[in-house]
Image: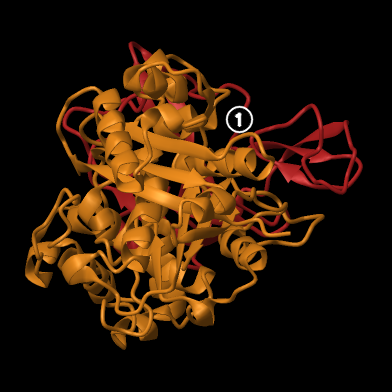
Chain colours: A red, B orange
Amino acid sequence: MSTAARVAALEGWYTLDDPPHLLGSRCRTCGTYFFPRLATFCRNPGCEGTTFEEVKLSRTGRIWSYTNACYQPPPPYVASEPFVPFAIAAVELEAERMIVLGQVASGVDVTQLKVGMAVELVLEPLHADGGTERLIWKWKPEGASR
Amino acid sequence: MNREVAVLGVGMHPWGKWGRNFVEYGVHAARAALKDAGVAWGDVQFVSGAATMRCGYPGYVAGATFAQALGWQGAQVNTSYAACASGSQALAAARAQILAGGCDVALVVGADTTPKGFLAPMAGHRPEDPDWVRFYLGITNPTYFALYARRRMDLHGATVEDFTSVKVKNAAHGATNPNARYRKRFTREEVLASAMVADPLRLLHVCATSDGGAAVVLSSLEYARRRGLKTPRIAAISTVTPRFASNEVEMPDIATDSAAAAARHSFRASIAARAYEEAGIGPRELSLAEVYDLAASLELDWYEHLGLCEAGAAEALLRSGATRVGGRIPVNASGGLACFGEAVPAQALAQVCELVWQLRGQAGERQVAGARVGITANQGLFGHGSSVIVKV
């Protein structure tokens, strides 16, 4: 059992609940979703909305496409030593009609992914910072062991 | 009203990893273009620079930086930044000045010095900047290229072999281009033996970042006529933004637009559509195209976005040999980014330089026979479309 403090790597982008949700905005006028959140002017050109409700986005979706990072990305990415390649997925959320990118849960390789595969949102450390784990959202194939 | 302008001259500094100041490449290219045009620097009335974000303040004010380096002579100045589309925007600013009667002759210049490796965001902790956020998550430029490559494989039956064919084709085109950085005729085996960067794309499927410079001298048609010149003309410059809800998974965003309350639109298809509309021509009239092959797989997407074939038919077009020099519609006769690597503010202008050499019949071994109309296409980070049509 880890005693490390667990905080969000990006403040306000997702809940730290179990299960977690991405936090978006929904325009009160036209119903368009935004991620990350938006609090000013609706970006739908046919809408003049200026008020938004904070919403939890669907925490499941289907893989639109996927890849991996075989080379260590440059900063601000904080790499482990040695660098461990990771998979990345673009996931289509049905209700929101939007695609959200994210890393794929650790231990899941590109060879295990397919376009159209159902995935769910989980939280995992993006990197550690002293005794603090910085958590980020990741996509995990549904039914994979947790 | 005729909205065309004449291209009097073009010039480049060869692409490479020279490690020198970007101003040097820009001035070299500018002098080459002026010489090609037969125009004295003192006769240029408008200087339009494409900015670079990696070379400090002189890069942010590239137009004035080049004007000073060429020797202040009182010309009016402009600098444009639109990431990879910066060159087209600088070109559009010069064309607008000419068509508005503000000048007869304009010089457009873009040049860059790039660091080794991945392009990276500006420093600092900046979670409000989507470009910073995606790098923090480990999402680099090749990630986006690979997402589209994998999608093509799943939807349209593209294979790694197809992506490799694009690279091998472009390498063969660029092998005799004196301005190209890589002039090696890569084989399939070499491409497939290179390291995996972002599955399914290997190092030799993905373009490098390069140093380089390109310049174009434009004038009014009237000016060219007075001097008795019959030159290629710019028939269209598209600098469109996306339409909401854009369906593009686009750098540097972490999420697409939501289409919950609006129809989805294809941004990439709209870029060329605007250029065709402006020029009053269609894809069937094209002799060649220069497209942004940031990765070999993206060239296939452009075939469809330019209307060279139907959606889903790019693989068949490639396999037919139509997009090779000698084929029906050669794509990236210059060698493309595969042979140049990307020098961001110079790249859109380099595409125009290639069309001009091709339309003049000066492209040497990579010459497209009888070329009369060419189109360029690229796309800059943060929603910048770029497409230029040049014709004789």
Q: Which structural element holds mark 1?
A: loop
* Residue B260 left/right relative to B295: right
Which residue matches tag 1? Answer: A13
Q: Nearer the viewer, residue A15 or B284?
A: B284
Q: Is residue B220 above or below residue A110?
A: above
Q: Residue at x 36, y 40 (%)?
A: B346
Q: Residue at x 63, y 50 (%)?
A: B240
Q: Is residue B247 visible?
A: yes
Q: Is residue B130 above or below residue B35?
A: above
Q: Point out residue A84 in the picture as x, y percentages from the top left corner.
A: 23, 39
Q: Nearer the viewer, residue B77 or A70?
A: B77
Labels in figure, total: 1
Q: The numbered mark 1 sits on a residue in which chain?
A: A
Q: Point out residue B2 in the picture as x, y percentages from the top left corner.
A: 68, 59
| Residue type beneath disc 1 | Trp
* Residue A41 left/right relative to A139: right
Quadrant of residue B376 within the rendered picture: bottom left
Which quarter of the rendering shows the N terminus of chain B? bottom right
Quadrant of residue B384 within the rendered picture: top right
Q: Point out residue B157 in the picture as x, y percentages from the top left corner.
A: 38, 80
Q: Residues within 10 Å of mark 1 (few under 14, many from 20)?
A: some
Q: Is residue B123 visible?
A: no
Q: Point out residue B5 in the picture as x, y percentages from the top left corner.
A: 56, 53
